[in-house]
Image (cartoon, rainbow, N blue to C red):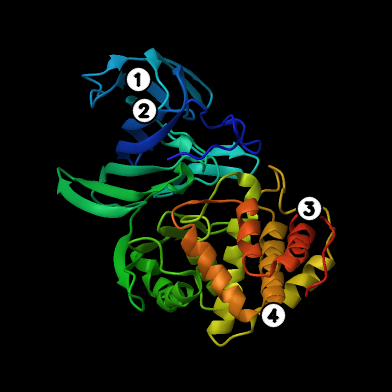
Amino acid sequence: MHRFLGADGARDPYTPFVGCCAATVEHYDLDLDYDVEDNGLEARAILSCRALHDTDRIELDLTELAVTDVRFGTGGLGGLLGGRRVRADHRGSRLVLTLPRVVAAGEAFTLTVAYEGYPESLDGPWGEIGWAELDDGVLVAGQPTGSSTWFPCVDHPSHKATYRVAVHADADYEVVVHGELESVVERDGERHWVYTSRVPLPPYLATVQIGPYERHELSGSRVPQYLVCSRKRRKKAEKTFAEQGRMIEVFNDWFGPYPFPSYTVVVVDESLEDPFECYACSVFGKNQLGTDWEEQRLVAHELAHQWFGNSLVLSAWQDIWLNEGFASYAEWIWSETSGDRPARWHAEKAHRTLSKMRQDLVIGDPGQVRLFDDVVYVRGALTVHAIRETVGEDAFRTLLRGWATANRDGWVSTAGFREHLRGFVPRDRWAEVDGLLDAWLLRRELPALP
């Protein structure tokens, strides 16, 4: 699945160094043989692609890892044995493939890439992202362009695909991959895990988590929940996520049904700067466990991303406030529905905090370097609250649920949200709500809270 960024399929200006304008990948079939002890990876990726225009040149994102063979095929003939060899030019993070013939616009074809090496994080404008070797295991945080550290892909949210991922690792380790666990077989001291995700997702939501973990079920929701952590973290982790089932039910009411078959939380045995979300999964550091508000708001925030960011995927990174503003506002929704402080209290506190800061960021276009700036999160949440105060409680609840359900498994943009918001006020108030969004999203000055 692909959504053009513009009429010509131009690259995202926030991440001009990734992506492909010639083709999209509709399915990834990944086979990963991983040695935890030395961080060695031998892998094969079969990409089911479709040409976006006539071309004999495809560009993929793949960082550092060595490509040993690439084959091209059509009609199901694309394996390393049956496909035609492809000339590959791998420079830095770009894998440029020259096909043996021109593929026509709309034509389906496969690329089979064999590769190996020692994956490592990518150091970019947002810090280290992608594959990270832990003291005992692996963590993968793909947002926004880190997926190229472990498989060849078109690493932009405008390109979605389904996945099958097989991982072969030492039997002492638990493996978590985005999607649903289809099978796990132990043989000759290894476990062979197979996960599938049938809902198309962008590469940055794909993940692999490997560690000396145990898997436990959590209760409290009709949605199956799993906790994956080491034995020594289990007790504190279970307390941390004890209310998560109730959060799911609250968010089901506010945002519509939980969008995926299950939800898994992974707790790593190291400290993280921030937890992060993946497809139907979130990852927390050992330092983010606890039952106080600061920890519980993180649980709510990452859960809310399953709707805002994972089901509703951005067309372009410029609109990041649609992810972080709504997930941050979900923290306040949980606070007031769980009997803690109302959203208005949190909004007023956040507004006071921002008013003391330099007003130098336009959150509707924050720029590449400040894509994940705290102001995007907080002012984004304030924007949502300003809408709530402007349209009224009943309309706001309908607006919020309608936005999440109408765009389920789709792409979203600020322009699309503006049109959605207009549907909840009379035509003679369109200028008012347009002005509200302009003030909060497109100007630096902090507006007054309605």
Residue 358 place in picture, x, y as percent: 85, 58
Tell me the residue at 65%/39% (across/down): 14
Q: Which tag, 3 or 1, sits closer to the chain's start?
A: 1
Q: Residue 64 versus residue 443: which sits nearer the camera?
A: 443
Residue type at mark 1 is Thr
> Is disc 4 in contact with disc 3, using a CB cutoff of under 8 Å?
no
Q: Which tag, 4 or 3, sits closer to the chain's start?
A: 4
Tell me the element at label 4: helix
| Tag 2 residue | 116
| CA separation in Å, label 4 and label 2 | 52 Å
Q: Nearer the viewer, mark 3 or mark 2?
A: 3
> Is disc 1 in contact with disc 2, using a CB cutoff of under 8 Å?
yes
Q: Nearer the viewer, mark 1 or mark 4?
A: 4
Give the vertical position of 109 relative to 145 (above or below). Answer: above
Residue type at mark 3 is Leu
| Tag 3 residue | 361
Tell me the residue at 61%/69% (across/down): 329
Q: Quadrant location of the C terminus?
A: bottom right
Tell me the element at label 2: strand
Residue 69 place in picture, x, y as percent: 33, 19
Q: Residue furthest left?
A: 187
Q: Which mark is residue 344?
A: 4
Would residue 351 appear left or right of 280 to someone viewing this image? right
Q: Which tag, 3 or 2, sits closer to the chain's start?
A: 2
Q: Quadrant location of the N terminus?
A: top left
Give the vertical position of 85 relative to 383 (above or below). Answer: above
Q: Which mark is residue 68?
A: 1
Tell me the element at label 3: loop
Tell me the element at label 1: strand
